[in-house]
Image (spheres, rainbow, N blue to C red):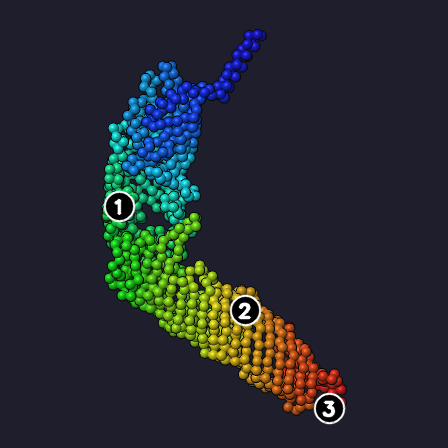
């Protein structure tokens, strides 16, 4: 029993000792200076530690805190390496021989600074050369090997920074895990896994960088044989361009880069392949995924800092694009390259354009081939570029737009240097073509639509593009070609010709708001002279025939002057102005000033909504669909309209002038004035065409109106006199507008007569003065507070007058005794006197 208890005590003591060895790390102050001196001698750099602890379990070794390895002062005062925690495992067999040998170093969250000095050398080079000259055994040496072995060095969650002299670059590698070991007697191996990052920008989706390889012992670093492989995968193209250039260029796609480097730094063989999957512009999501791939090989010479025998090839359908020659590193200004394109299908070029340019027709197809070559030479900042090529048998087809261009041969040249004027054959009025001095592609002049079509010339460069269009053209064909090129063009059926002198220009993506580059639309400026053009706008109503007009496209607006057109059965003259650059047409408010000699309101209504010629004039602007005409629903415009004579059924007005405003289906006419029935008329009216049915309303005044002329228009001389009135009305512009509308009117009639209504006068009621008010409701005017001063005396008038001209009036003498009742119709009234009135008459 006692023996069993003693064993338990021994086991308990052993367990306690083991636990203490796990938890406690005895200090090693006497070893600290020895370790610092040993590491300084091995690295050739000053080393500092804050503390050293001996660790016995799970493996004998040391725990080092706050390790700092200082850099060569020639590269700066900042340490080359910092590590808060370092674990050093001791090789057990070395202890048996009475030596202290490190088998493994584990660095937790170290920070490594790689600095390139003014001489062009890196601070890491001296350390690598020192390691190569140190007679150490391989990391996995034989047990009997008496030499110390190179330790296995591993770092987790490291950060690798890059500096150019004293300047710290924003580029860094984060979450880096790397391992370093001596692979064999004269070779070392390394593995790295990290995420590229920029400290001055918010970048993500940068993918993962993996590097692995070996290098061998050599007398000089430049002669060190090496064999490395590099893989950068899952990088998002937009974030990659932001990482390299400082902002998101606006392109999307998954990037995969694989490269191998073999040889020596002085003579390095490089082979790489780059693939971009689902390449597209950030705001284009439709269409099939596009894959871009290229393979390159070359030889790098460190003495010249140049790539020689560079050969890149990208297969494109049955053709290929190749780049060959020699080139220096970025910034060296050394170029000696040849770029060739052989038998590249036009359909492949269109696929690339479709993923880079919005608004192309969905069914656009292309046939033909691209051939060309260009040399890139130079030893300065700007390389000299010379070359030429052509699209042969180019044909573009869109069944949706009923457009076909070609087949055509489109030649082009590639050049650099200063612009020396328009290409030979270009219209003499094209001095405004101003390409940049750098490398550019120039094309034209070429006609894309056969005989009697405008000539097209232009240039494309890294900074942007510009295209000149000059000559007489067919308007319908030009609109189709514009849509084919992805330009905003009016959807209309057109006929006629135009004399064009236009330039279409633009720049490539500019920095956006930290999200993506801003792809600006093309800018079209110049002039166009229209002649005998007939236009039917889709959703816009009847046709417009433009006999002539001058269009001037300015950067901020479009001006139409000398307009001579025919629409709504009448001829119009005047000018228009529409702003540009405000996004969509519905956000731009146009301005106009137009005039016509005569306008028939019913014909205007029939023009806006064809097939409604017999509708009442007050329903002229009512849509027959579930809302306003699509064209009116998307227009914002205001201006002045003047009409010499405005005809409304059998009633006309002259000298009509008004301010008109159309705002997305809401029409307002203010200050409408004119001569009406021998008097003056002013009014403000509005129509809400976006409602269904449309809402109508307004108010106005009439002064000095000759009522006899109104009766003549009705072909019934039922009234005479001069009237003044004020009114307001509201309702829906549906069938039977007046039957459902509400209106209020105050009237004043002087020196008038009602010939059909006879009281005591055989020639009808005289109206020395007749004033009052009337309310329209449910198709009837209710007369109230009306006073009639006639030859038979003064009467208070009340009752109703329907829109069917049915009368129900009462005339009561001011004295309150006697009066009349008027019934029947306006054309055939019936008058009956009260008993008191009959007695008076007798």
Picture coordinates of residue 773 (x, y %)?
65, 77
User: Tag 2 or tag 3, which sits nearer the N-term?
Assistant: 2
Tags 3 and 1 in contact by the CB under 8 Å rule?
Answer: no
User: Tag 1 or tag 2, which sits nearer the N-term?
Assistant: 1
Q: Identify the element where label 1 is drawn.
A: loop
> Dot 2 corresponds to which residue?
687
Q: How many marks?
A: 3
> Dot 1 corresponds to which residue?
333
Tags 3 and 2 in contact by the CB under 8 Å rule?
Answer: no
Mark nearest the camera among 3 and 1 is 1
Closer-to-camera residue (787/819): 787
| Image quadrant where one finds the N terminus | top right
Picture coordinates of residue 582 (x, y %)?
44, 60
> Dot 3 corresponds to which residue?
841
Q: Identify the element where label 2 is drawn.
A: strand
Q: Is residue 770 left or right of residue 28?
A: right
Eyeballing the image, is 822 above or below 390?
Answer: below
Q: Distance of mark 2 from mark 1, alpha carbons? A: 68 Å
User: Tag 1 or tag 3, which sits nearer the N-term?
Assistant: 1
């Amino acid at each position: 029993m006692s023996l069993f208890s003693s064993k338990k005590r021994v086991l308990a003591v052993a367990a306690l000792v083991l636990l203490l060895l796990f938890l406690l790390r005895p200090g090693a102050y006497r070893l600290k200076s020895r370790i610092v001196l040993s590491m300084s001698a091995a690295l050739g750099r000053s080393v500092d530690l804050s503390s050293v602890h001996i660790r016995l379990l799970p493996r004998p070794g040391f725990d080092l805190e706050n390790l700092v390895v200082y850099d060569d002062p020639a590269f700066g005062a900042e340490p080359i390496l910092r590590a808060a925690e370092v674990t050093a495992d001791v090789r057990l067999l070395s202890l048996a021989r009475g030596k202290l040998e490190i088998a493994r170093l584990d660095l937790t969250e170290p920070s490594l600074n790689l600095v390139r000095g003014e001489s062009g050398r890196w601070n890491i080079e001296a350390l690598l050369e020192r390691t190569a000259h140190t007679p150490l055994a391989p990391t996995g040496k034989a047990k009997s090997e008496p030499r110390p072995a190179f330790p296995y060095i591993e770092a987790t969650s490291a950060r690798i920074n890059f500096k150019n002299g004293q300047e710290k670059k924003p580029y860094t590698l984060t979450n880096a895990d790397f391992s370093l070991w001596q692979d064999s007697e004269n070779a070392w191996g390394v593995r790295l896994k990290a995420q590229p990052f920029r400290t001055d920008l918010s970048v993500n989706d940068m993918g993962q960088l993996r590097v692995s390889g070996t290098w061998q012992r050599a007398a000089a670093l430049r002669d060190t044989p090496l064999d490395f492989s590099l893989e950068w995968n899952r990088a998002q193209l937009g974030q990659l361009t932001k990482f390299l250039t400082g902002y998101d260029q606006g392109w999307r796609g998954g990037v995969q880069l694989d490269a191998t480097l073999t040889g020596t730094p002085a003579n390095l063989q490089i082979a790489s392949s780059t693939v971009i999957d689902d390449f597209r512009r950030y705001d284009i999501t439709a269409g099939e995924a596009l894959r871009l791939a290229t393979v390159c090989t070359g030889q790098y010479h460190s003495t010249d800092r140049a790539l020689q025998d560079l050969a890149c090839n990208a297969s494109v359908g049955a053709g290929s694009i190749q780049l060959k020659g020699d080139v220096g590193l970025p910034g060296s200004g050394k170029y000696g390259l040849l770029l060739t394109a052989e038998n590249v299908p036009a359909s492949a070029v269109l696929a690339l354009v479709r993923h880079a340019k919005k608004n192309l027709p969905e069914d656009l197809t292309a046939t033909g081939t691209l051939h060309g070559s260009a040399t890139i030479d130079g030893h300065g900042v700007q390389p000299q570029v010379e070359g030429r090529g052509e699209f042969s048998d180019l044909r573009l087809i869109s069944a949706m737009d009923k457009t076909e261009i070609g087949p055509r041969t489109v030649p082009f040249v590639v050049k650099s240097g200063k612009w020396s004027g328009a290409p030979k054959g270009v219209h003499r009025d094209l001095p405004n073509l101003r390409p940049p001095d750098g490398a550019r592609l120039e094309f034209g002049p070429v006609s894309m639509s056969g005989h009697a079509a405008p000539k097209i010339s232009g240039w494309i460069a890294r900074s942007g593009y510009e295209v000149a269009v000059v000559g007489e053209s067919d308007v319908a064909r030009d609109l189709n070609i514009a849509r084919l090129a992805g330009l905003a063009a009016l959807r209309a059926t057109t006929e006629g010709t135009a004399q064009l002198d236009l330039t279409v220009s633009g720049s490539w993506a500019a920095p956006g708001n930290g999200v993506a580059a801003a792809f600006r639309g093309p800018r079209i400026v110049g002039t166009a002279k229209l002649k005998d053009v007939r236009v039917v706008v889709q959703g816009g109503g009847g046709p417009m025939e433009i006999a002539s007009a001058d269009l001037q496209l300015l950067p901020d607006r479009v001006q139409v002057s000398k307009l001579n057109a025919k629409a709504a059965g009448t001829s119009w003259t005047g000018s228009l102005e529409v702003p540009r650059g405000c996004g969509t047409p519905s956000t731009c408010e146009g301005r106009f000033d137009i005039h016509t000699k005569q306008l028939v309101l019913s014909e205007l209504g029939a023009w806006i909504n064809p097939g409604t010629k017999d509708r009442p004039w007050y329903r002229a602007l009512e849509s027959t669909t579930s809302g306003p005409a699509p064209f009116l629903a998307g227009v914002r415009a205001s201006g002045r309209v003047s009409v010499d004579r405005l005809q409304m059924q059998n009633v006309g007005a002259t000298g009509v002038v008004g301010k008109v405003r159309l705002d997305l289906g809401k029409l307002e006419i203010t200050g409408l004035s004119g001569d009406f029935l021998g008097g003056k008329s002013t009014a403000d009216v509005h129509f809400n065409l976006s409602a269904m049915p449309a809402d109508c309303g307004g108010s106005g005044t009439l002064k000095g109106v000759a009522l006899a002329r109104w009766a003549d228009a009705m072909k019934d001389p039922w009234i005479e006199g001069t009237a003044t009135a004020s009114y307001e009305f509201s309702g829906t512009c549906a069938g039977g507008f007046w039957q459902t509308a509400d209106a209020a009117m105050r009237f004043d009639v002087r020196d008038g007569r009602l010939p059909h209504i006879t009281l005591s006068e055989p020639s009808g009621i005289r109206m020395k003065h007749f004033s009052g008010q009337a309310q329209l409701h449910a198709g009837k005017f209710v007369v109230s507070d009306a006073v009639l001063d006639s030859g038979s005396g003064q009467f208070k008038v009340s009752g109703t007058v329907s829109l069917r001209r049915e009368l129900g009036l009462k005339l009561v003498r001011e004295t309150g005794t006697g009066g009349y009742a008027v019934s029947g119709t306006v054309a055939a009234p019936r008058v009956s006197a009260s008993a008191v009135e009959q007695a008076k008459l007798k």
